[in-house]
Each structure stands twice: as structure tokens, then as C-alpha cells.
Image (cartoon, rainbow, N blue to C red):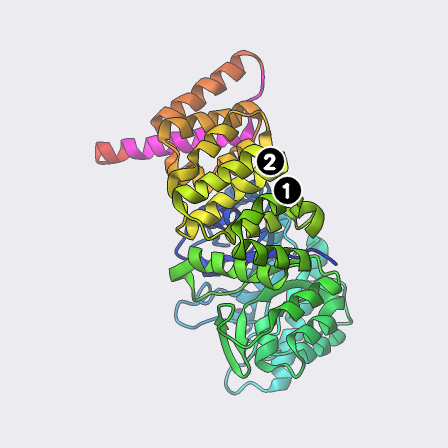
Amino acid sequence: MTALRFGYGTNGLSDHRLDDALELVAGLGYTGVALTLDHGHLDPYAPDLARRLPRLRRRLEALGLGVVVETGARYLLDPWRKHSPTLLDVHPAGRARRLDLLRRGLGIAAELEAEALSFWSGTPQPGVSHEHAYQYLLDGCATLVGDAREAGVRLGFEPEPGMLVPDLAGYERLRCALGGPEEFGLTLDIGHCQCLEPLTPAECVRRAAPWLVNVQIEDMRQGVHEHLEFGDGEIDFPPVLAALSEVRYRGLVAVELPRHGHSGAQTALRSLTALRAASADPWTADAIRRVESDPATLTALFPVAARSSGPEQGEAARSRLVLALPAQGAELAKILDGLYRDGDPAERLAVLRTLPLLDQSGRLGPEALPLVADALRTNDARLVTAAMGPYAARYLGQSAWRQGVLKCLFMGVSLDTVAGLARRTDSELLRMFRAFAAERTAAGRPVPLDLRIQLDDGDALSAGNSVRRDGS
């Protein structure tokens, strides 16, 4: 069975800066992100877009996040009308604006090495016949297919309830009308399947399998197009996830909760917990039950999790076993200390990467900082990288945190992996950066690109502060 790759949509983290949103998604254990082009996170019309994209690609790579580019922002093109204009707009200028956005999206997707560009048809305007609207859509999609072929990007067309193409049958007709091009893939929203398809969501997955390039997931009720948290709707998720694994789908399965930004971090954690529970292999599900009923069994189960649940799922299984513990605070930290110190490098890595999840659930606090300090004393790049994650960004003292950042530099660990770097960089760290760069230059060695970027950002910030002090 294929291991699934869970992602989270940035439209559900609209109150976060993009860099913070990516840090949160990766820190919780997701392996991908569905990135919506919008004013707040990544504006496709921003004058500094060309400068931002290479940095964003490096950030995604450093965090181990796959990416799909989404184009469903509500008011990106028109501040007065939601999702307007579309490819169905009666005015050629309106259709051209939407097509321009989608072409920009293709360029962004190519630059980010995204797995797909997702888009939908839109809703016909009053007075526009179905025939005319469909021809507008065909023309726009045909143009996009050619552009996607040239850019080397897969399109993921999303059937959307209430739009011209609302369902799987509509996608199949459209694909056939276009001549069945390889580039014209499918974005399948599992909630939409529950909302309006005659088949079950699991049956929809099997029907869609030949064209599937992107999956969105959330709970929903039949006949009601409202994106709900897992457990608040009617979908039975284990058969859905089993079907995705069965058809060997390897793309992202990204949570789509665009109206939950007010509780973004908590919702993202609950969502991943629900998805992992629904996709757990039999061994992991049984092991979790054993830990919940007898926490002492964890010491025997934790080391064998990778062998018993499979190598691709080993770290996630270990994380879930730790999260199943009822302990908290100092008691929990003591258990973590035992797992870490008795464990091999993979087990230690799993402990370190689970710290942000335990802390987000309100059960840990700074009690596990000794584990971070120990990892930072090692010469294992993976442990150092994990140690400088979101948990350290929140709790590690400034002096120790600076030393951790500097250790990353010395070990060749990308600064793009360091959580909280933009938030916590201060004048002293910039001084350390400059000294490190000067030593490299004096020795005739190149200054790493990620360090040069941090120095450029620091110089720009200093210049801005100077202007404000001068009152200019």
C-alpha cells in the first residue's frame, strides 16, 4: 500500500505570514502545502515576485514540503465580486484577466517545482447560455493546456459544486472535449464527493484514479457545500484513504479548511491527528490502544514501530504513540528523556520532531529543553536540524538559540530549516553572521547563499530603521 502524503492549505492559515505558515505546517508533521495565490501570502502581481520565488523554493525544499499551487482566492482580481472574473466571463477582457492569472500561476508552479496547478471553471453570469459559457471554458482550457505543456506543469482541474463543471462526470466530458491531453489532470475534493456525487467518496477516488494529480480533503454533509473539520460531517475517512493508497496515488492530500484561519494552528493539528488515525495501519492502531490503556508499554513499542508499521510510516507511528500518552509536564518530559537517551538516531529524531505537537496540545511547555540542548551538542545534522525547529524557536533562550543557528552554519545545515529565524534574528546574530562571512571570505571560501540572504535582509532592515530614526 502507498504511504499517503498529507498537506495543509495556506488559505486556512490566512492570519499567518507565509513563512510562519510553512514553519507551522512542517513543524506539525505535514509533508506538503497547498499554496493559494493571494494578496496576503504570495501575490502573483507583486513587484518583488521574481525575488521571492527562488527563496520560497529553497524554504519549501529545506522544510521537506511538496507544493501544489491553488488559484481559488476570492477577491484577488476583483475586490467587489467573489471569484471574478472567471474563464466564463461574458467580456473578453474578463476572461483574459483570469487566463493571465492562471498563466502567472503556471510560471510560479514551474519556479517552485510544484506538483500541479489547480483551478476551476467558474459560474456562468446571468443571461449567458450554457453553450456560450462552455465554449469560453473550452477555449480557456485549451490555451492553458498548451501553456502547461510548455511550462512542464500538470493542471489539476477541480469540479466545484455550483459551478459550470460541478462533478466528476462534468470533468470527464470536458477532458474528452479537449482531446484527453496528458496535462489536463484532476483535482478531487473529497468533501465535494460527499456533497453531490452519486458514488461514495471512496468510489469517486477509484473512478478518478487515472487522472488524479491533486486531492483536497475535509469533512462535509450530503447536499451542503460547507467545508467542515474532520468528524463534523458525514464522511467515513478510512475507506477513502485506503482507496487513495490502493490506487497508488502519490500526490498531496491537502486539508482544505479556508474558513478556519481563526484557529489555524489548532485546526491543523487536529486535522493531521484525524488523518493519521483514519489511515493507521493495524499494528499502529493496536499499539496506540495499548499505550492509551497502559503507558508503560511505550518503551517496548516505540523502538519497533518502524519495523512493524513500515519504513515510510515509522516516524509518524512513533509520534502517534507518544501523543497517545496521558502524561503531561514534567512527567511527560521524563518519559521523553528516556525514549531519547535510550534510542538510536531515528528514535531520537522522532522524539525531537514530536515536541512541537506535544507543546501545541498544551501538555509540555519548556520541560523538554534538555533534549534540544543535547541534540545541539551532537554532530548529527538531522538531529541539529530537528533541534532548531519550532519548539526551540519558542522556548530556547536567545543566547543558546543564536549558538544553535551558528552551529547550523558551521555544519552546512541550511538556515532555511531554522524555525523562527525572521522573528528572532537580532543585531548580535547579524554581527555573528558578518564575522562568519568575513572569515570565509578571508580564507578564500564562498559565503553560503542562505547566509548572504540573511545579511542582505539585515542590511535592508538596518537601513529602514535608520530612515525611521532620521524622520525621513
**Amino acid under label 2?**
Gly
Front-lying residue, 75 or 286: 286
Quadrant location of the N terminus in the rendered image: bottom right
In the image, what residue occupies the spot 23% across and 32% down?
Answer: 469
Amino acid beneath label 1: Pro
Please state, as top left, top right, bottom left or bottom right, where the C terminus lies in the image: top left
> Is residue 188 among what the camera can see?
yes
Q: Which mark is residue 303?
A: 1
Q: Say what secondary structure mark 2 lies in.
A: loop
Q: Circle 2 sits on which residue? A: 343
Residue 457 colored in magenta in the image: yes
Q: Position of residue 13 (x, y in %)?
A: 44, 57
Tell which circle, 2 or 1, labels the residue nearer the N-terminal end. Answer: 1
- Disc 2 to disc 1: CB gap under 8 Å: yes
Q: For the point 62% across and 44% down, which residue is it?
A: 300
Q: Nearer the viewer, residue 83 or 150?
A: 83
> Where does the image place residue 117, in percent across and percent down from the top left?
62, 59
